[in-house]
Image (cartoon, coloured by chain):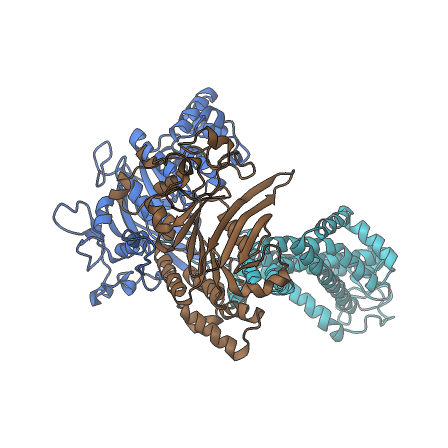
Amino acid sequence: MTGARTAPNGDGPLLDITGLAVDFDTEDGVVHAVKGVDLSLGAGEILALCGESGCGKSVTAMSIPGLLPRGARISGSVKLEGRELTTLPARALRDVRGKEISMVFQEPMTSLNPSFTVGYQLGEVLRRHEGMSRGQARARSVELLDLVGIPAPDRRIKEYPHQLSGGMRQRVMIAIAVACSPKVLIADEPTTALDVTIQAGVLDVFRDLRDRLGTAIILITHDLSVVADIADRAIVMYAGRAVEQAPVTELFARPRHPYTMGLMKALPAAVTAAGVGERPRLAEIPGMVPTPMTDPDECAFQPRCPRAEPDCTASRPILEKAVSESPADGHTVACFHPLEGEGR
Amino acid sequence: MAEQVVERPAAPVSPGERGRLWRRFRRRPMPMTGLVLVVAFLVLALAGPMLTRDPSAQDYNAIMMPSSGAHPLGTDDLGRDALARIASGARISLQAGLLSTLLALTVGIPIGLVAGFYRRWLDPVVMRLVDVVLAFPFLVFAVGLAAILGPSLRGVVLALSFIQLPQVIRITRGEVLAAREMDYVAAAIADGSTDGHILARYILPNCAGPLIVQATVAIPIAIIGEATLSFLGLGVQPPTPSWGVMLTTAQQYLDQAPWLAIWPGVMIALATLGFNLLGDGLRDVLDPRSGT
Amino acid sequence: MTPVLEIDGLVKHFGAGRGQAVHAVDGASLSIAPGEVLGLVGESGSGKSTVGRCILRLTDPTAGTIRLDDTDITHLSRRALRPLRRDVHIVFQDPYSSLNPRFSVGRIVGEPLRRHRVASGRELADRVAAMLERVGLAASLSRRYPHELSGGQRQRVGLARSLILEPKLVVADEPVSALDVSVQASVLNLMTDLQRDMGFSCLFITHDLSVVKYLADRIAVMYLGQIVETGPAAEIFASPQHPYTQALLSAAPVPDPVEQRERSRVVLGGDIPSPLDPPAGCRFHTRCPVAVERCRTEEPALVSRRDGGGPVACHLVTGADVPDLTAI
C-alpha cells in the first residue's frame, strides 16, 4: 500500500501536521530543533521518520502528543481527525495521550516501574482509561500480552519487570501502549536497544498490530534496514526539515534527494552485495551537520552536497512533487537539483 | 530532551570547559550569594585583623558598651572591641575550617584511591572502619577526641579532620569505583601506564568535582564544630578570640549585652550559609548526577 | 606463519555473589594471522567484549591461554606485560568515555609514546601531528579537548592513540556502533585504509553483521560465551552452517524493501538464557529449531566439517545431515 490513507470518516488524513516548528531555549541560545515539518498519516499506515542524530525526528514525534520538555516553544498545527492538539488544554491533552495517541520509547528498562508486576501496570491503564473492573482488566491484560507475542501470558502478568528480558519488556511496553486501542502509536527507536534476533520479533508485533487492529504507526528510527523492513512510507529528515518523502519501495528504488542517496550509499550493505571482504570504499558525506542555532534561507544540505549549484544558497527548497507523472506516486523532495531517479 | 544538540560533558571540568561552567554558575542567584558571602568571610578573616584594633586591648572607659563610633559593634565585659574580636575570630574559624578539611582531604584521598582502585582485602577493612566512625554521633566523637588531644586550636583541627575523614574516604572510593570502569582508564592501561600514573592523571582529576563539593560542605560544619568545641571549653582557649569563645562569654550577659551574643551568632550563620550555598551551586554545575 | 594472537580454551567467570558466577566466556578458542581482520560477532551477553578485554588483560582470564606472537601472556604480571603493550591496543565503542576529558587531544594521542619512552619533546609533537593527519584530523586539533569534538572526530582520536606505536594487533570493540551512518562510513573507510597501509591484524568485535560483512576476512560467531562457528567471511555469509548463525543472518534486515520483504526468516523462540546458569549440552538447544535429544545432554565441540569448511560446534552439522533451516 502506498500514500496516505484517509481517516474512516473520509475527510482527510488521520493525523495532519503542518508547519511544525520547535525551538528550545538553552543556556547557549535558541536551538531550532524542528524548523517546519509537514506530515500526514493515514489510518493503518506505518510511516517511518528517519535521519541521523540531531535531525529533529524525535522532537517532531514528541511534539505530536505534547510531550516536549519545558522551555520548548512549538508552532504550527497538529490535527488528529481534524481536532487541533497544539492548543488543547493540558487536561484534554492527557486524555488524548494513552487513549488516542500512545508512545513506545527506546529504553524498555527504564520505562516500566520496577515495583509493580507487569499485570498491575497493564491493568492500571485499563482501569483508569477504560473503566474496567479488576477481573475484566486481568482478562484483557492476558489478551494483550498474547497479542504482542509473549508466551504463557497468564503466568507472565504476575512477574516483575526485572524478571523479563529486554525484548519481553519492550513487548510489555507495546502492550501497555496499545491497551486502549489508540489510533496512533508513536514508536521512538523501539528496537535500537535490542539484539537483531529480538528486533525481528518486535517488528513483527508492530506489523501485526497494524494488520489486526488497524493502528497507524509512526516509527522513528536511524536504521534504514528497519525502514525497509516495516514501513509503508518514509520521511527523511535533515537539520530540522523533511527533505524527502515517498512510499518505501519508491524511496529505496529511486532516491531523489542527494542526502537520501548519500545515506543509502554510506551503508556497508550498499557495497557488499558485489562480494564479501572486497572492501571497496564506502560513500562518505563530507562536512558536518549545520548548527541548529541558525536557520539561513538556503538549502541546509548545500554545503555538503555534490550537486549543489549557486541557486541552492539563494533560497530554501520546499518539499514538492518529484515528478509530475504518476508512477512516482506521492514522491516529494525538497531539492532544486534532485536526482533523476536513476536508482542506486 | 531527546535531541540534545549541545553536547554534555562526560565528566566535569576539563580546562577548556571552565568558561562554560562559570556561565552556568553565574546565572544562579543562590550560589552567587554564597560566593559573595564566602569572599566577604575570607576578606574579613585575612584583612580584618589588620584593619581593626588589637582584639585583646582593653578600653576601660567602654565596658559592655553597645555600638558607638569608637566601637562599631560595641565592647565586651573586659572592654575589648567586638569588631576586632569578630575579625580575629574569623581567622580562627577559617583556620579550623580550612586546615581540618585540607588535612582530611590529604589523608582521606590516598586511602580512598587505594581502597577503591585495588579493592581486594584493603577495601572491606577500610570501609568497615569508616562505618564504625560514622556510627558515632559526630559531636560526641569530636568532644571525646578534643578532650584527649587537649584544648587548643591544634586539637580542634585534628578532631574535626578526623570526623571528616570517613566522608572523604567514602566519596573518593565511590568516585574511583565509577572512574575505574571508564574506557579511558582501560585505554590508559593499554597505553602501558603504571598504576600510579593512572591514579594521579586519570582517576584523581576525574573525582575532583564531588570532592570540591564535599570540601565546601565540610568547611561550614568544621566552622560550627570549632565554635561548638570552643563554646564548650574544649577548643580555643580565652583570651584568643574565637566565635565560640565569644559566645561562651556572651551567655553570661545576655540581658545586659545581647550584641555580644548576636554578632558571633550572625557571623557563624552567615559563614555557614555562604559555604553551603556555594557548595550547592558547585554541586549543580560539577556533578551532573545530582541533576537540575 | 605464527598467528599474531592465539586464544585457547579461554574462560572468564565473574563472581556474582552467593557462590554464583556469570559465565561470560566459557571455552573460546580463536587465532588471528598477521594482517588478518577477524570479525567476532554476537549479540549482547555473548561474551564477545570480554574476549577483547581478556586479550588486553584489562580483565584476568579464569582459565585458558592467550598467546601474543608466541608469548604466553595469560599469567604475566602487569609489570612484565607493560613492554608487550606496544604491540596490541584497543579501540572502544563509546567515543565519549574512552578519552580522558582532562587531557588535550595531543596529550591523549602522545600518551603511548610517553609511556613507552619512545619519543619526547619535538619528536613526540611531530609524531602526534603526523598521526593526527593520518587519521584525517588537522594537527591544530591537538590543543583541543575531547568535549570540543564531534563523535566521529573523537573516534578518530581513539584510532590515532591506538595506532601511534604501530601495534601488530588492534582490538576494536564496536568502534562504529555509536556513530551515525554517514560518520560510520568515513571511519570504516579510514580503518580499512590504515589497516592496508600499516598491516596490523584486527579483532573487530561487533553485533552489526553488515559491518563485518564489509571488512572481515574471517568471522567467528559467539553465543553465550562460546564460539559456535568460524570461517572465511564469504563462506559464512554464503552458507552459514550453525543454526544460530543462520538465524542471526536471517534476522538482520537488509536496507532494500523489495529484497527484505521476500526473505524467509528463521524465527528463534525464547530469550538468550542467563549466563549465570547456561543450559547443559549445546547452549543453543533451548532456542534451536532443529535441536534433538543429544543436543540437550552432550556439549558439541568446535570441529571442522567433513566437507572441509570452517569449524562448527553443532552435532547436526558435524554429525549426520546438514540441516538447511531456510528450507523449513
Chain in blue on the image:
A
Residue C132 visible? The answer is yes
Based on the displayed image, in which of its 4 quarters is residue B219 positioned? bottom right
Residue B273 visible? The answer is no
Per the rendering, the colour in which chain B appears is cyan
Q: Residue at x 35, y 35 (%)?
A: C325
Chain in brown on the image:
C
Residue C6: x %, y % from top left: 51, 54
Q: Nearer the viewer, residue C88 or C108?
A: C88
Residue B183: x %, y % from top left: 53, 57
Residue C77: x %, y % from top left: 64, 59
Based on the displayed image, in which of its 4 quarters is residue B200 positioned? bottom right
Q: Residue furthest top?
A: A135
Instruction: Judge whether C252 appears above or below C109 on screen.
Output: above
Residue A145: x %, y % from top left: 42, 28
Count the marks.
0
Q: Nearer the viewer, residue B273 or C127?
A: C127
Rendered-image quadrant of the N terminus of chain A: top left
Q: Nearer the viewer, residue A135 or A194?
A: A194
Q: Is residue C258 left or right of residue B207?
A: left
Instruction: Judge whether A20 appears above or below B7 on screen.
Output: above
Q: Is residue C202 left or right of residue A333?
A: right
Q: Residue furthest bottom?
A: C122
Q: Nearer the viewer, residue C153 or C304?
A: C304
